[in-house]
Amino acid sequence: MKITHASHLGTAELTAELSRLARCEREATAALIVHLAEFDARRLFEGAGYSSLFRYCRKVLHLSEDAVYNRIKTARAARRYPVIVNRLESGALSLTTVRLIAPRLTPENHQELLAAASGKGKQAVEELLARRFPQADVPARVRKLPSRPAAPVANVTPTDTAPTACPPVAGFEPVGTAPATIAGAEAPLALPVPAAPRAVVRPLAPERYEIRFTASAEMREKLRVAQDLLGHALPSGDIAQVFDRALTLLVADLSRRKFAATARPRRSRGQSDESRNVPAEVKRLCAARDQRRCAFVAPNGRRCDERRFLEFHHVVPYAAGGLPTAENIQLRCRAHNGHEADLFYGPGKRRLRRGVVSNGRAICGRESGPGTGPGTSTHSDSSTIP
Ligand SMILES: [Zn+2]
């Protein structure tokens, strides 16, 4: 049966159906992994006219490149350690986390390591592996790239932890190297060329990370100037320390602008009772109390953990007489600020127009929408953090 819409379902029914479908997908994925492992072991793709399982999966099974990579690597790990299949089916492990952990599995450690990775996301598993299998620091490097980068070829080695999510960054890895292989793979796997290099943040060991990205010539020059200016304080010009100092200043500046954070808070000059401006001391109190993350708590008790796109939210809306006090202001992410507006004003009413009057008080919210840039508000009872 082909389902093209679900608009007829009520909230409870839709939520339950979504859970059921997710469970079905996990079961189907686990079954696919089992069959793919057997198909691979018999090398049936050769008889079907394909030189690799990767090509077979792409052409016959119509799986995406990322999907093929994760599934082949998981299938080969599951063949060695069948317990993986049960954990995939239960949702304790994902294809991504199995791919990350597979190169480290041994007959001796697999039960314990798979249990430790269960229930964790990609980043947490990378941290786990960095703790268990610490790697040496990588040397700081700045390397000039061609002005028009050649299409890089993925170079996946057994130590690569996220080759599809974090393709090699040209300038730090040789370009045009030999075809990639999957660790422990029975057959070489020709991986697709990634569309563009992406920045990499990879745990190496406890408290140690490798960060890679491509910089512009302008940024390179700024780095050079910063190294020169730090000549006395930092004779080595160590790039990591230069960036650490720069980020320390940036975080302090953004914290001041977004949350009025300062080591020397000044006394408020006061403001009109009619003002909807959130005073600096209220911003500081709210940011500290809400731990700089969205303070929305769902009816099921879950608190949102979003830390980006935060806004100061009036618990009792300004339009209903709510004042910008610490008791009435909380942090909300953009989505939940909009959600609160929907709850109060009704769906679709969150973009109120300037000058609308409610309860005898002018609502001075800025009408805005996606793409209007920072400093705008999605409804009248928020103050977007710049
Ligand atoms: Zn939120």
Image: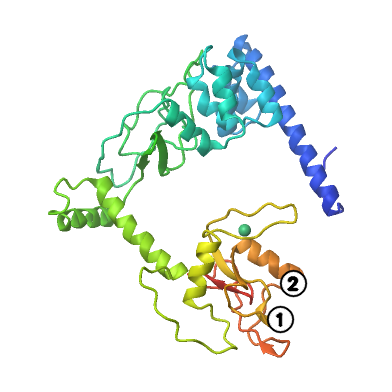
Q: At which x and y percent is residue 36?
A: 65, 19
Q: Mark 1 near mark 2, Cβ–Cβ under 8 Å?
A: yes
Q: How is the image coloured?
A: rainbow
Label 1 secondary element:
helix
State the residue position of label 2. Answer: 344
- At 43% from the left and 24% from the top, the residue drawn is 180
Label 2 secondary element:
helix
Q: In the picture provided, is 151 more to the left or to the right than 172?
A: right
In the rendered view, would you say 26 is above or below 31? Answer: below
Q: Quadrant of the N terminus?
A: top right
Q: Is residue 239 visible?
A: yes
Q: Nearer the viewer, residue 7 or 384?
A: 384
Q: Which mark is residue 320?
A: 1
Mark 2 neighbour density, 10 Å: few (under 14) some (14–19) many (20 or more): some
Q: In the picture provided, is 114 more to the left or to the right than 21?
A: left
Callout 2 amino acid: Phe
Disc nearer the start of the sequence (1/2): 1
Distance of label 1 from label 2 (alpha carbons)? 10 Å
Q: Nearer the viewer, residue 316 or 176?
A: 316
Q: Nearer the viewer, residue 204 or 212?
A: 204
In the rendered view, would you say 283 is above or below 149? Answer: below
Q: Is residue 54 visible?
A: no
Q: At which x and y percent is residue 316?
A: 68, 75
Q: In the picture provided, is 282 more to the left or to the right than 362?
A: left
Classify the position of ligand 1 by quadrant: top left, top right, bottom left or bottom right: bottom right
